[in-house]
Amino acid sequence: METAVPPQFTAGPGSALTISDRAAICGHHSLRWEHGDRSVITVRAPLRFAPDPYRPLDDQAWQGTVDTFSVWIFNETPVDDVVRFEFGRGDRTDAWFEFRLGFTGWRTAWVRYDYDMRGRPHPGMDTLRIIAPRRTGVLHLDQLILNAPLRPDAPCRDAQVPDIAAEGDDYDAQHWQALHLFDRLLAGARMDTSPPSAEETASLRALTARYRDEYLLTPVKVDDASVAALTAQVTAYGVPGATSTGTGRPVFSYQTQIHPAAIAAELKAFADPVALGAYTDLMRSLALAHASAGPAHRPALAALYVRMTAHLRDQGWTWGSCQGTIHHLGYNVRGYYDSVYLMRDVLREAGLFEGVRADLTWLCGFGRVFRDRTHRQAHCSVMDILNTTLRGMLAAALLRDTDAERIAWLRALLDWLNWALLPTAGIQDGLKVDGAVFHHVGFFPDYVRDGFTGLAPLVYVLSGGVFRLADEPHSWLKRALLAMRVYANRNHWPISISGRNPSGLTALSPVPYQWMAISGTPGGSGDVDPELAAAFLRLLPAAPTAAQRKVAERLAARGVTAEAAPTGNWAVNYAALAVHRRDEWQVTVRGHNRYLWSTEIYEGANWYGRYNTYGQIQVLHRGNPIGNAASGYVQQGWDWNRRPGATTVHLPLDELKGDLTGAIEEMLLTDSRFGGAHTIDGRNGMFAMELREHPKYEGSHRALKSVFLFDDRIVAVGTGIGNDSRHETETTLFQTHLAARTDPTHVGAAEPVTAFPYTAAPDIAPRWLLDDKGVGYYLAPGQRIGLTRSAQTSRDNATEAPTTGDFATAWIRHGVSPRDGGYEYAMVVGATPEGMAAFAAAMDDPAAAPYTVLRADTVAHVVRDRATGITGYAVFAPLKDAEGPVREVDTPSMVLVRADGDDGLALAVCDPDLRLYGGIDPDQYEQGRYVGHYSPWSRPWLTSPSHPHLMRVTLRGRWRADGDQPCEARVRGEATAVRFETVDGRPVQVRLRRA
């Protein structure tokens, strides 16, 4: 519609069609329609509609496309009427929808033929009729697309098309897509606006001052040059004058999704849109400059801001509009949320304030605070909300007209926030009782970091008065932050918890600790939290920001010093994660089970991530600020098959790559209940899992794996390894990037290997190895080892581009199609060649061996550590006649036990089965066989709580509980049955005395 009226378009009586430059959303012209009362445009062209298998609210794993119609409409005069779009065969109408016209500016709608239109679309449709409202007037149409294949969860209903895509209110992305619902909830809410108390008023004054002066404002230099630069940027963004409408560059976020693939790139370039995020960031820059400017520059900056605001609203980023789709809105309007409060007086003077306030309230979905909190997706993507949208919700509250209204809105917001920060049941998003935090119905620290980075400054803004967080949610938030600085080694995550971002560079941010340190403690006592303050000082960057320096100086003046690096052992079973820390190093072990997805593979992210949680063991050293590289992980050249500790089938990369046919993501669930971590004394611990690969891939692949974590010693045991694959099965010992090709690899007592490239003789069997990062590996006799030092070729996890890198890699060979394979090895952190030789020699003497494997079969792995006196049991099936102090265990579980003085025993048990449901998930089975078709999003147990379980451990000897202990001990002859109630995969530890 750029140069001529398309020949397929015919104007009926009372209509005229011309090409006009009065308004445009794609290019510089649009179709100008002068219409009469109910006059008609007829478009004759094959609509090419075809039915598809999508069913609303079916499993999110299916993400094919559906046939969708779209159009942009520019309206100068709002009217309480509609444009009707009818689709059919010749004069026959098969389907239709109506587009409401109560707006000015540009609006668009994406309407799915088979799900949003009335009537029944037909594959033979060849005619579109556009019927005008009951008035005479002018409308402009642009970018009319008769049929585009589109993700079915993209369209959003709004004030123009309120009846489409109603299931969007229940999607996983409902936190952005349900704006129409949230607006209706807000309209129906009744908030208490009675006169506030003196305490509430005083708290509001202090809160507002913190919000403006400490959160929003950042002083900037303003002079002629900086104003000229901002003016030039506004001009480059194609922002017309404040009174111009319908023109200028379009402002898009995800709006180009509707473009047909064959012409998408060309059409996007032709439309030449400005990214919404960049646009609103510029608005924030203008607001900050205006706040810092003197009287000479303020008028020009105010005028620029008003122009940008008017254009943004004219483009449809306003109340009631979802712009076809509103996906990921929060990431793109943070600058707008922050700027409006600073520019409220400018907007009032321009007559825009009330409209903009309504826009902001719509875009942030403030009405979400009134949604039924028992809704299945009530907590969905709460980290996204905290990161991107909470700031808009606070701005919406503080922009009310009176103190009474502001306080009422703040109460409603705080009530929601206090609820949102309580632990959630099942796998729904949010905080968990063990310190894990979920996003995308799984443990995903990158989003947790961002959520807390958005939240923490606002917790500070709310602190110190009646609007501070309640004690319980504040305590849970603090616990989650303290846990985060445990599973990050100083800053960076281990790869196994990096989600779909295996760059090795993702890490925590000190920002949440910075703000929470000065937000007071749960209960509101004082203005500094000593624990979080000490954590912040340890995490303080080498080059802190001015704000961070200011907080650090404030804390130092209060006598707070940096904490020592956390030392101990933690079981995080809502992540199937073991964390073991000493002396600035960290060992993590990660698994998965039937509740926790094994990895998240996205279109263009983590393509080769299948084995990420197959028992991966990673050592991170000394919190090096450059991430995982100093500990051996570098993505370039990394063999995605060989993750240290993991037992895998070594596949060509084309076979390892995730298969996303008909999907945009993969989050597979196994059918194994058993996978998690355990700890004793908070200092030592273990990990165990029953590995069963998903039937989508090598469904026959099985292994029983355990890892025992004792001080600087890690003992790894595997049994029951088997599959039907034609490829080699391996358990990787290490894969370390060589900073220099001459960095040595020690192979037993022989001279260190510095040759490069180097391939060891087939099936070598050394007693020990020492990698170039100072981690030693003792190898039990009888195992076949592969070892290379070479320039490896791999692919980028996202782009699939070839990569290369120099690595030393060692693995245990299990062969092709193994049956009941196994392994046993021990790792020593901070080892030397001399130390490893001594370790191996000691293992030859049963009286001096650092550890002893008492049992390793398909029922249990039992390991005793000499130095700590701990015996650990990985129990995969009910256990009888066990070795060591434990005789029987009735539940697949983990048990740790040690002597405690002359007559005491420390006993710790953990059932890692979260028990979110009993029996099987029948949807996941066909004819008694697990097929696992469905993703976690659709599971009926998504919000189910962990169900308590009674387990029994029978000990040798006569024992009694020492005081008030969370167990019941009954002596039976010369044995004692100890019963425990377990829940949430949490370890339970008790002290027993001889009876």
Image (cartoon, rainbow, N blue to C red):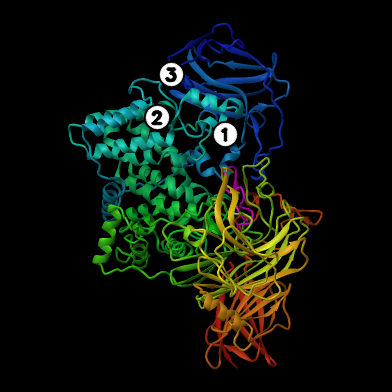
Q: Nearer the viewer, residue 593 or 393?
A: 593
| Residue 784, image x, y percentages | 70, 68
Tag 2 near tag 1, CB within 8 Å: no
**Dot 3: what SS?**
loop
The residue beneath circle 1 is: 155
Q: Amino acid at mark 3?
A: Thr
Q: Which image quadrant is residue 349 in?
A: top left
**Dot 2: what SS?**
helix
Q: Amino acid at mark 2?
A: Leu
Label 1 or label 3, whichever lies nearer to me, is 1
Q: Which image quadrant is residue 903 in?
A: bottom right
Q: Nearer the viewer, residue 995 or 409?
A: 995
- Report how far apart the C-alphas of labels 1 and 3 lie in the structure: 26 Å
The residue beneath circle 3 is: 77
| Upstream in sequence: badge 2 or badge 1 | 1
Residue ID at (25%, 36%):
290
Q: Is residue 801 visible?
A: yes
The residue beneath circle 2 is: 312
Q: Is residue 218 left or right of residue 134?
A: left
| Residue 503, image x, y percentages | 51, 51
Boundaries of the magenta span: 598-612
Magenta-colored segment: predominant secondary structure: loop
